[in-house]
Every structure is written in C-alpha cells, then in structure tokens.
Image: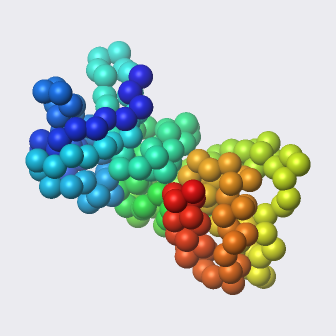
Amino acid sequence: MFYSLRGVVRHTEPGFAVIDCGGVGFKCQTTRYTLSHLPAVGETATLYTHLNVREDALVLFGFADQEELNCFKLLITVTGVGPKAALAILSELSPSRFALCVASGDSKTITRAQGVGNKLAQRIVLELKDKLSANLAANTDGFPPPPAADASGNAAEAVAALTVLGFSAPQASAAVAKLDGALPVEELVVQALRSLGSA
C-alpha cells in the first residue's frame, strides 16, 4: 500500500520514528540501523515502508534503504520469524552483513540478535539459502556464470549476498565481475553496492 514516505522527522525513540507527511505523523517501527541513518529532528527523510495488517492493528515499518526493506520482507517469510524478530536481527546486523551471513551459512552471527536462538537462526539460514538458490537458478538463464572466484569463493559469496539484498543474479554478477575477486567478501559487497547505487 505504501511504497515510501518522505517528510520531516518529528520524533525518534528506540524502535520507531515519526515522519510528518503533509501534517500527518506516520509512526514507523524501525531498526537501530535505520535510526542511525536518519537526519536530525526537523530535517527531511525518506523511509521505504512495509505495512503489516493484523486483526487488531495496522503496523507500519520503515527502513533507510531498499536493501534493508528487502531483508525484512525475506525474514518475515521464514517460519517462526515475525516482524519483532526481523527488526531485532536487522538492528544487530546491517543489510549487507545479514546477506553475508545467509550466503555463507553463518547462523551463529545471527544469534547475536535479541531473542534469536540457535534453532531459529539455523532455520533462517536454511530457508533463505534455499530461496536464494532458487532465485539464482531462475535468474541466470542466458547469462554468464558469476565471475571466477578465489579458493574461498569470495566472488560467488558476494553475488549470493547481493541477491539476498534484492538484486537480480545478472546485476550482481556484472557488478562483482568488475572487482578484484581476491578482496574479502564484505568489501566486494560494499563496493558492488556502491557501483549498483550509482548505476
């Protein structure tokens, strides 16, 4: 229903921000990551949104960028992960770090989020890795494979992480192909995100 909100930041507290759009203050549940990227109260900001409809409430979630919104939407598709757990995870991990955890099978790092135990973290990695594999398979027809990677598969992991963030496999492969495959995975993701953002 709402794609994004652009307006004046009226108030922030841990867990939410209020964005004033034409005199209406929208309370957006959000993460520490997004709160840290918002400008000061009184300045203009844009949040990418997701509306959660429940029997007893309409809850609006807002995110600093589309990558974080994509991660949130992916997380709430996992069995046992509701909006509260998804916000906790994305408060602890940036979108690129979360994507790396999924791509590399690192469930332990996800357990740093409040209220997320081993079993839930493992389920998140398992379910999202399966979705990632399906997405890669569906999007690589007629497109060259990901760039050659070093022995640790850094370039392939970076492509997988970018796909978790919502980029298509061809976009991710093309961005990573321009970089040095010997770089650490996180650096590959960060540099690829910069190039994709400026494209």
Q: Nearer the viewer, residue 68 or 127?
A: 68
Viewed as shown, does residue 18 lie left or right of 131? left
Q: Nearer the viewer, residue 55 or 135?
A: 135
- At horizontal 33% and vertical 42% (from top left) the residue drawn is 47
Where residue 117 appears, as percent x and y from the top left, is 46, 56
- At horizontal 17% and vertical 27% (from top left) the residue drawn is 22
Q: Nearer the viewer, residue 162 or 21?
A: 21
- Outermost top residue: 55
Please tell me whether residue 82 is drawn above or below residue 121 in the rendered image. above
Q: Is residue 43 visible?
A: yes
Using the rendered view, name the quadrant where residue 48 is placed. top left
- At horizontal 17% and vertical 44% (from top left) the residue drawn is 9
Please tell me whether residue 180 is drawn above or below residue 22 in the rendered image. below
Viewed as shown, does residue 132 lie left or right of 59? right
Using the rendered view, name the quadrant where residue 153 is placed. bottom right
Where residue 12 appears, as percent x and y from the top left, is 15, 47
Viewed as shown, does residue 176 lie left or right of 63? right
